[in-house]
């Protein structure tokens, strides 16, 4: 019996290089526009579907590790760094200039990620300080941030935190729904259906108990019922 085999060959072409950064954040706006962020204060932007990239380093923030970025178009983007001090920066001119819209010099601050319900309303969260998850909310596209940590009454367990994994441990959906996943010693899912004004906590049935265990990312499958 004859045996036929078919082989395929692929050629991978680097689209960009020479930038000393470890990329962590990504925000895809369209099939043409995307932003990325990473270590050494580096931000990348493409407006031609990834064929070419512009590399940006906000002045004065060259040592930061930008773990998450949220972009709305080719001009507007918000970035957040991991570690202390914590900053959130906003650009409205494609990265030419950046405005510092949040700063926290507490040595314990460690922001993990952010997500937006729409172009105006978003939330940033971070590891606990004195057993309280850090929560920030914006209603003006990241221009200002309000600390809403006290809205979450539940205390986090010792050794419970989250992973700054490209902002993928927080998910904002629809009109006010948001989920945040924690890990480490204990893993929980924190849920609000009203933009973070009130919260519920659910045990997460995933491997946990060590500092590197727990969910690194969450996503949702939205089912559409066809009538």
Image (cartoon, rainbow, N blue to C red):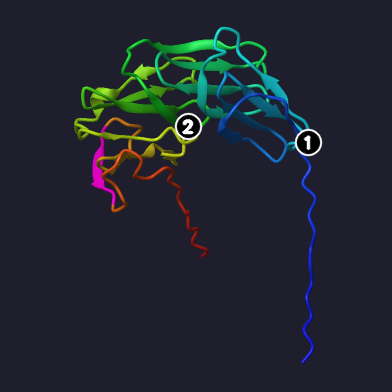
Neighbour class for label 1 at 10 Å: few (<14), some, many (≥20)? Answer: few
Neighbour class for label 2 at 10 Å: few (<14), some, many (≥20)? Answer: many
Q: Which residue is mark 1?
A: 51
The CA distance from mark 1 to mark 2 is: 27 Å
Name the element at disc 2: strand
Q: Residue at x 56, y 7 (%)?
A: 60
**Is residue 201 covered in magenta?**
yes
Q: Residue at x 59, y 16 (%)?
A: 91
In this view of the protein, which residue sits in the foreground, 18 or 38? 18
In this view of the protein, which residue sits in the foreground, 220 or 51? 51
Q: Are marks 1 and 2 in contact (CB under 8 Å)?
A: no
Q: Is residue 167 left or right of residue 15?
A: left
Q: What segment is highlighted magenta in the picture?
A: 198-204
Q: Which residue is mark 2?
A: 116
Does 103 sit above or below residue 29? above
Q: Residue at x 77, y 84 (%)?
A: 3
**Among the two numbered marks 1 and 2 on one chain, the one whose residue lies closer to the N terminus:** 1
Q: Residue at x 50, y 34 (%)?
A: 166
Provide residue 189's location: percent of width, then percent of height.
30, 43
Q: Is residue 211 left or right of residue 61?
A: left
Q: Is residue 78 left or right of residue 35?
A: left
Quarter-wise, where is residue 126 in the image?
top left
Does 216 sit above or below residue 96? below
Provide residue 187's location: percent of width, then percent of height.
28, 43
Quarter-wise, where is residue 214 in the image?
top left
Provide residue 64's location: percent of width, then percent of height.
51, 17
């Amino acid at each position: 019996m004859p045996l036929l085999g078919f082989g395929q060959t692929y050629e991978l072409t680097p689209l960009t290089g020479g930038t000393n950064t470890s990329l962590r954040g990504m925000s895809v706006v369209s099939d043409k526009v995307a932003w990325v962020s990473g270590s050494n204060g580096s931000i990348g932007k493409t407006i031609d579907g990834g064929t070419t990239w512009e590399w940006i380093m906000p002045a004065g923030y060259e040592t930061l590790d930008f773990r998450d970025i949220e972009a709305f178009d080719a001009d507007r983007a918000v970035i957040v760094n991991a570690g202390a001090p914590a900053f959130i920066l906003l650009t409205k001119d494609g990265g030419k200039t950046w405005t510092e819209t949040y700063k926290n010099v507490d040595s314990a601050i460690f922001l993990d990620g952010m997500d937006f319900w729409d172009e105006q309303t978003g939330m940033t969260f971070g590891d606990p300080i004195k057993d309280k998850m850090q929560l920030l909310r914006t209603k003006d596209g990241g221009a200002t941030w309000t600390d809403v940590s006290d809205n979450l009454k539940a205390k986090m367990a010792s050794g419970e935190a989250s992973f700054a994994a490209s902002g993928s441990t927080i998910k904002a959906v629809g009109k006010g729904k948001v989920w945040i996943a924690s890990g480490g010693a204990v893993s929980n899912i924190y849920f609000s259906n009203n933009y973070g004004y009130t919260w519920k906590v659910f045990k997460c049935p995933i491997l946990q108990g060590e500092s590197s265990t727990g969910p690194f990312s969450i996503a949702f499958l939205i089912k559409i019922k066809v009538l």
